[in-house]
Image (cartoon, rainbow, N blue to C red):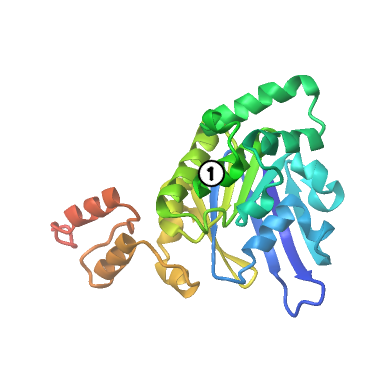
Amino acid sequence: MISLTNLSFRYRGGRRDALAGINLEIPDGDFLGIIGPSGAGKSTLTYVLNGVVPHHYGGDFYGRALVNGLDTVDAGTEKIAGELGSVFQDIDGQMVASVVEDEILFGMENFRVPPGEIEGRLKAALNMAGIEDLRYRALSTLSGGQKQKVAIAAITALRPRIIVLDEATGELDPASSRQVFEFLRDLNRQFGITIIVVEQKIMLLCEFATHLALMDRGSLILHGTVTEVLQGPEVLEEGGINIPRVTSLGKALRERGFYTGILPYDLDQARTMMENLEKPVSGV
């Protein structure tokens, strides 16, 4: 479990808090999508989770951040990395090897995985990611989606209980983005790995995440299930989030008195909404 209590942080020399009074609990096995405009504090929050803040980015840190019982201020980044793995937007900048196999081996060797376990973990990570056929491929020959899978496989080989991705699909096309999210869903459902994704593609998050968190100006504005968060579309729009089109339709119908149910975020829910429009709002 991740527990953030009265968490605030201001970068050294910053004019305002990058994080301001965050209180949030993320249970084991959750799939959380974090949304918000530029400058909302989303990336800084991920830096707190993996210990980059305050160990590499200094400043004024208040409150407490616990990752599976580890206080991120006291534990240090290497110990936290045993519990939580991170994948960033600049995937090429994160790669350290030239071949898929070496990329996955690098992390295990640096984290001193016992030699007798390395081959088994390597094969398991490749299998989990569905990229066994890429083992000996040069990274330069892979697509964006394939590279993301390699990065996540390298993290899973370390066997963390939590994976955090910061705008990891930002430069990917829709098909590659979906490929990455489907892989994350498999990790979440089959292995119980907690997934935390900072992402601007709201439709993907609505389809794959179980919870959403809206941030703005360093504060946590909304947190709940996807359905719960989308019931406040005005707040999302004020935060610069483009809500799903079917949610916008439901909002417009509700404002005109044609609909009183929950706002939809996918086609099945939209279909149900349209069927309910056939009935008088009064229920008579």
Question: Percent x, y for residue 108?
Answer: 75, 33
- In the image, what residue occupies the spot 64% across and 66% down? 41
Q: Quadrant of residue 252?
A: bottom left
Question: Percent x, y for residue 141?
Answer: 54, 44
Q: Quadrant of residue 231?
A: bottom left
Please state if 271 lies on the left or on the right of 152 as rendered: left
Q: Amino acid at mark 1?
A: Leu
Looking at the image, the residue that sits furthest to the top is 116
Question: Percent x, y for residue 84?
Answer: 70, 43
Q: Nearer the viewer, residue 72 or 102?
A: 102
Q: Nearer the viewer, residue 151 or 135?
A: 135
Question: Percent x, y for residue 147?
Answer: 56, 45
- In the image, what residue occupies the spot 60% across and 43% down? 139
Q: Nearer the viewer, residue 128 or 63?
A: 128
- In the image, what residue occupies the spot 79% across and 50% down? 72
Please state if 178 lies on the left or on the right of 113 as rendered: left
Q: Quadrant of residue 99?
A: top right
- In the image, what residue occupies the spot 17% across and 53% down? 275
Check the image and report above or below for 21 versus 144: below
Tell me the quadrant of the picture where the N terminus can be found: top right
Q: Nearer the viewer, residue 32 or 122?
A: 122
Tell me the quadrant of the picture where the C terminus can be found: bottom left
Q: Which residue is mark 1?
A: 142
Q: Is residue 226 visible?
A: no
SS for dot 1: loop
Check the image and report above or below for 263 versus 211: below
